[in-house]
Image (cartoon, helix red, strand yellow):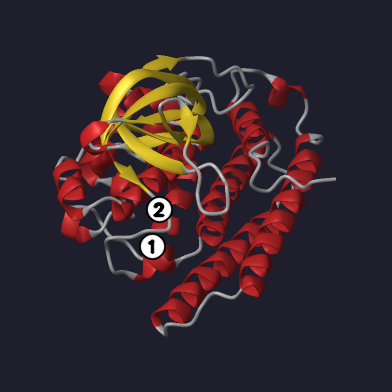
């Protein structure tokens, strides 16, 4: 197992997560924190998984982001038929990842199979995935299949990495080691057993009932908090006289708030109480406001660090670029 210092040294300036770190992640099954124990995963409670994601985001932004999105994709183990899920996750190296966009079509074939064609953006962890997840419009004889309301039917699919072409087209200033690439599939035949619908579960656990809005908000928020904490550590190394106590305490208080949200959510669901829309709004508004506040405070601190902080080979510069690249994710961006 690598120490925190060794992990950061390996990730500094990296364009891809080194295989040695991937091996450690697989050994600890960190990509399967949300996979039920019955399938071989860790089956962690929400607050346990959030703490792990915070800790790894604090080590390195790209590393934490990759873990968050890939473990989040492995959450779909709960949406697959048990026989398929057990088969896939009996392998500790099974790792899902993909795109939330609708980028292709699934042409209905005979015997419950589909033919997948399309192009999808932003599949985090692409070089390390064993399977890609994607959303596609269902078609038959080239025509879109519609539901009772006349809307196009959409289905999610899991396909092997061997059936896709990865396009390494990430050009952003940060998150360079996340392996967030596009991918395409051409005439990939998939059986219906490898398709799923997000709201349909084959497991019976409280995590199945957590609204996606809350799950996405909390898992992403701990990434911002982890990177902000790392930024503070690197900033004080450059300017030891700075008083960042207020900033560190804000992060600490925010993590306590996040853990409170996680426990409250599970408690409500354990009591068979629905998570009302007001609770989802409360968590989302809190998270959005916090990311906005953290962003302004990081900028204020950065302005005081001097020219060293602009060196492209400095640790604080990498954290800065990772953080502000991550803020461009649509989840917390405000619509004006």
In the displayed structure image, the side of residue 62 where residue 127 appears, left or right: left
Q: Which residue is mark 2?
A: 52
Task: Provide residue 138's location: percent of width, then percent of height.
Answer: 43, 36
In the displayed structure image, the side of residue 175 where residue 31 appears, left or right: left
Q: Secondary structure at mark 1?
A: helix
Q: Quadrant of residue 161?
A: top left
Seen in the picture, residue 10 relative to 49 is either above or below; the reply is above
* Residue at left offset 44%, top offset 20%: 183
* Residue at left offset 44%, top offset 58%: 51
Task: Provide residue 242's location: percent of width, then percent of height.
Answer: 74, 45
Viewer can see residue 291: yes
Task: Provide residue 266's location: percent of width, then percent of height.
Answer: 44, 74
- The reply to whether discs 1 and 2 touch (Cβ–Cβ < 8 Å) is yes
Badge 2: residue crowd in 10 Å (few <14, some 14–19, many ≥20): some
Q: Which residue is mark 1?
A: 48
Q: Secondary structure at mark 2?
A: helix
């Amino acid at each position: 197992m690598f120490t925190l210092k060794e992990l950061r040294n390996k990730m500094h300036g990296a364009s891809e997560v080194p295989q040695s770190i991937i091996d450690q992640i697989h050994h600890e099954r960190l990509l399967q924190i949300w996979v039920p124990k019955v399938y071989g995963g860790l089956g962690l409670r929400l607050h346990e998984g959030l703490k792990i994601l915070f800790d790894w985001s604090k080590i390195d932004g790209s590393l934490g982001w990759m873990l968050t999105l890939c473990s989040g994709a492995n959450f779909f183990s709960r949406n697959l038929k048990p026989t398929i899920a057990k088969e896939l996750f009996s392998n500790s190296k099974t790792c899902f990842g993909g795109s939330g966009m609708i980028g292709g079509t699934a042409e209905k074939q005979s015997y419950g199979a589909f033919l997948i064609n399309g192009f999808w953006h932003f599949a985090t962890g692409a070089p390390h995935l064993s399977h890609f997840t994607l959303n596609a419009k269902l078609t038959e004889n080239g025509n879109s299949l519609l539901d009772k309301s006349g809307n196009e039917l959409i289905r999610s699919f899991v396909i092997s990495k061997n059936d896709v072409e990865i396009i390494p087209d990430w050009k952003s200033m940060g998150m360079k080691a996340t392996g967030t690439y596009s991918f395409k599939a051409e005439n990939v035949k998939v059986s219906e057993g490898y398709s799923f619908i997000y709201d349909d579960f084959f497991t019976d656990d409280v995590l199945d009932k957590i609204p996606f809005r809350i799950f996405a908000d909390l898992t992403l928020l701990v990434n911002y908090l982890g990177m902000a904490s790392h930024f503070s550590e690197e900033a004080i190394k450059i300017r030891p006289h700075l008083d960042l106590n207020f900033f560190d305490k804000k992060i600490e208080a925010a993590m306590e708030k996040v853990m409170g949200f996680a426990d409250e959510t599970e408690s409500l669901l354990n009591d068979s109480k629905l998570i009302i829309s007001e609770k989802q709004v409360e968590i989302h508004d809190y998270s959005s406001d916090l990311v906005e506040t953290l962003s302004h405070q990081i900028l204020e601190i950065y302005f005081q660090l001097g020219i060293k902080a602009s060196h492209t080979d400095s640790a604080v510069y990498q954290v800065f670029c990772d953080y502000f690249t991550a803020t461009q994710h649509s989840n917390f961006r405000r619509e004006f």
